[in-house]
Amino acid sequence: MTPARPSDPYPDISWWGWGDPAQIPTLGADVRRLLADALGVTGGDATESPALAAVRLPPLRLATGAARELASIVGSDNALTDDESRIRHTRGKSTPDLLRLRAGDATGAPDLVLLPGSHDEVLELLALCTHLRVAVVPFGGGTSVVGGLEPSAESFAGLVALDTSRMNALLALDERSRTATLEPGLRGPQAEALLAERGYTLGHHPQSFEYATLGGFAAAGSSGQASSGYGRFDRLVLALEVATPVGTLSLGRAPASAAGPDLRQLILGSEGTLGVITALTLQVRPIPRARIYEGWRFSSFSEGVSALRTLAQDGPLPTVLRLSDEAETVLNLARPEQLARSTREGGCLAIVGYEGAAEEVAARRDAATRVLDSAGVGPDLGAGEAWERDRYRGPYLRDALLGAGALAETIETVSFWSSLQRVYETVRTALSDSLTAQGTPPVILCHVSHVYPAGASLYYTVGCAQLEDPVTQWRTAKRAASDAILQAGASISHHHGVGIDHRAWFEREVGELAVNVLRSAKAVLDPAGILNPGILIDAR
Amino acid sequence: MTPARPSDPYPDISWWGWGDPAQIPTLGADVRRLLADALGVTGGDATESPALAAVRLPPLRLATGAARELASIVGSDNALTDDESRIRHTRGKSTPDLLRLRAGDATGAPDLVLLPGSHDEVLELLALCTHLRVAVVPFGGGTSVVGGLEPSAESFAGLVALDTSRMNALLALDERSRTATLEPGLRGPQAEALLAERGYTLGHHPQSFEYATLGGFAAAGSSGQASSGYGRFDRLVLALEVATPVGTLSLGRAPASAAGPDLRQLILGSEGTLGVITALTLQVRPIPRARIYEGWRFSSFSEGVSALRTLAQDGPLPTVLRLSDEAETVLNLARPEQLARSTREGGCLAIVGYEGAAEEVAARRDAATRVLDSAGVGPDLGAGEAWERDRYRGPYLRDALLGAGALAETIETVSFWSSLQRVYETVRTALSDSLTAQGTPPVILCHVSHVYPAGASLYYTVGCAQLEDPVTQWRTAKRAASDAILQAGASISHHHGVGIDHRAWFEREVGELAVNVLRSAKAVLDPAGILNPGILIDAR
């Protein structure tokens, strides 16, 4: 087939917040009152956009000759050095990332943004950067929340952002095998639109869906809101084409194989440290005809967790399965206007969704309903609709809260069912104790959003008043939570990745020997260490 | 819990064939006539056991002092140097392996067989072997069919077989997470018996089930006959404890994680080259109450493949799903006594099985029957029963055929659905052409036994008359088939692994750069290269 590309350019993501600033909600008087009363937050207006011109960019470090040589590979139209482009490629979308940019701090901005158009151009760029000892940050949607776009480039001759957005084609569709080969720079909606023209979907819808890219999903271990039905992103990956500084890796000739270790898995989760993914062959499915999302209420978090576990272990598995704890059910951060109503209803709200062929969905829903009905109250179709409408809106609310003087951020982990309750409480306590000790007692919400036969994820949202140095304030709390995660035997991340924020805990989690294995793989594929130095493993 | 161990010692596997020689079938007059008429095979009696005393063992190369030092780690009762023990740990169970042992050739036999009893003893052994530069072949059930137990130890100070059979405990059972932690030396039936006492099963039943071990399943990329329902073995693995020459790797804190690449996947399929798996935490399930296996007939292989693809892509997925081609349906090698009946019926036979809770099985079977019914004829419960009875008997028939002067061996691969028919024909032709050119036109049977949404496996059984040098005869044919597999874009193995037999093709399949990554991982974990040198990757 002729490669198919998105017809329209995709809107830029806000440089100081999430997505389109026009989508940031205005906090109503009741929410502001609650923020003031409960958290002591009294702040400004979230919609005030900071001035781009006020951002302090670091001086250029890349030599002019080197920049010109690099630009010649992609063409001068695709080599950007203007301030806005540099700022737009500075760090990701964690709360500390945003707080620093809002404060005008663009430390670590790349010297140059390059937009290669093909695998061969990426190969050529990486070889030249190796030769020139220029560090490279592979840049997809720019939505990392773990410092995955903040390499330590000090010891290099400059930093280049390798933006994949021009590599945005659907290259091939194999309808018999139901696989599609796609380029890494496609954002979620772009990939879905190209596939929808042919009747297919990936079904991968994380909260970052609207702005994150396929390459990022693969490189950072993404998992979507419908992971119960479609699986984590890594489960969709059948083949990968990877450009490294020393050549090409072509991995995956079949859905599964016993030909050695599955080396696709070494690239998945490698966060741009081993190579740049330039094509992905992914499992696709026919667009589901039927979609139903509904709410179920449980009297407590542990009752709800127990129902989720039954569905995950004995089936049938809904396509979407998530459960808010009591606090999240009450505060329902994504829909502050619903606050009063939610409070009245209490308990814990689960969202249960089914997607598929009409008959199959009906049968699966019937069987799941028998399980849910034994412990919960439902179905509440209104709750399902509300979830669907607001499913990508969480980050906009964060923008509003940050603007109002609140600190808002998320933390996530995953563990086995047998330790889930302990992990839930331990991490919650660690966050609460740290922030309370800092004088800013928080509100902490949590939900389970990804289930497996053996365990589930936990996703916390934390809100409190900002101190004068909110970055240090948050880092202190996050350190306490990360320690608690490891002490409770859970993993430092279920679907956000490692970046620099989790690096120390990642090393504790897998051990130094495992990290040495990764270092050795990096030494083979990236001998000069130019790719995302300091991300995932320490730069050496 | 107190570790639970099997109550009885497990019977030894025959050193010159499969399993228990008493199980080798006697070929009836009709089968012998067919072998003579169709293949020109006129041979002896399979039940004649070769004499152990006639086997030529290589001279011991390990220095006495080194052997004593190594033995002291496990205790002298667990260090075996007698001829029979050495012969029993020589190579695996491929047809060339058996032909050479039957001919009295035990080249490459280990100098010493060590049976460590714990992770710490394995660690100590590997460190000492590194110090002494003694090569180590980790030995589970000894059922490799790809030369996975035939390391190149010439440049080392000797070869030690590290037999895991004493490490055979169920260490822990987490009923809430449905996980069990087991030691690697448990054979399939031993593990199932220990779990059954608590009401659980792994559901992993490859043809080698009766003799292969959990450690081998993990290290060699195993897939069971019920893989549609239970998944490949790697999908059951939640955590691994691995002893390496430089220390311990403890991998897996949760069912899934975004904390870097999934390094469990580097150990799975590593075939004992990176470390010795000393404990596995595996997903278990309640023992299914209902089990139904049935036959379905399709008019052609491609009709049958199409029905399997529909079930794999749109569901519902039976627990067992396999389809014989026309030739295998006719010859049904595992049940030669049924030959006449099968011939009459013609077409292609599929075996479809369901395991689970009674109600769930009934619903799934109903829905799958609607799919099967649209293109096939069934259900034939007799065919299902016969399959269940004979599911582990294929290797015994090979013993009988080898004894009768036939050459019999298998080859397997996996590809995407879109190329499955092409792969099927290309590999078949390559095998047929090679053996016909050698003067021994073969009969070639094939089945699909593992399906995925994107593709399926192909498993060939080849029979022909033995030439004077049957090992070279088979290797010539296998080389042609392996070339054909790669040329058709398929993988060199779906579930047998790489060993030394597939090493050259494995390197072509993944590329030199990927192999260099494995080499670098090995250099970190096994700096002296003592673990299975020459297996998977070439010894350096």
Image (cartoon, coloured by chain):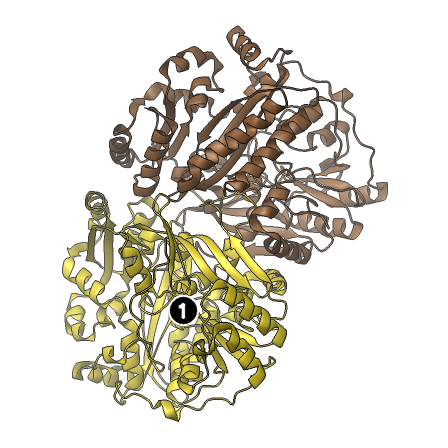
Chain colours: A yellow, B brown
What residue is rendered at 64% in x and 30% in y? B476
What residue is rendered at 22% in x and 59% in y? A299
**Nearer-the-camera pick, B314 or A316:** B314
**Nearer-the-camera pick, A186 or A423:** A186
User: Please, what secondary structure does the residue beneath circle 1 have?
Assistant: loop
**Nearer-the-camera pick, B122 or B498:** B498
User: Does any portion of residue A381 appear in the rendered image?
Assistant: yes
Indicate the position of residue B181 as horizontal and vertical percent values.
51, 46
User: Does any portion of residue B186 appear in the rendered image?
Assistant: no
The answer to whether residue B54 is left or right of residue A3 is: right
The residue carrying mark 1 is: A166
Q: Is residue A298 above or below residue A53?
A: above
Residue B431 falls in image quadrant: top right
**Nearer-the-camera pick, B280 or A215:** A215
Indicate the position of residue B438 as horizontal and vertical percent values.
64, 23
Indicate the position of residue B525 as horizontal and vertical percent values.
66, 56
What residue is rendered at 42% in x and 78% in y? A434
Q: Is residue A485 above or below residue A469?
A: above
Which residue type carries mark 1?
Arg
Residue B101 falls in image quadrant: top right
Indicate the position of residue A464 as horizontal and vertical percent values.
33, 81
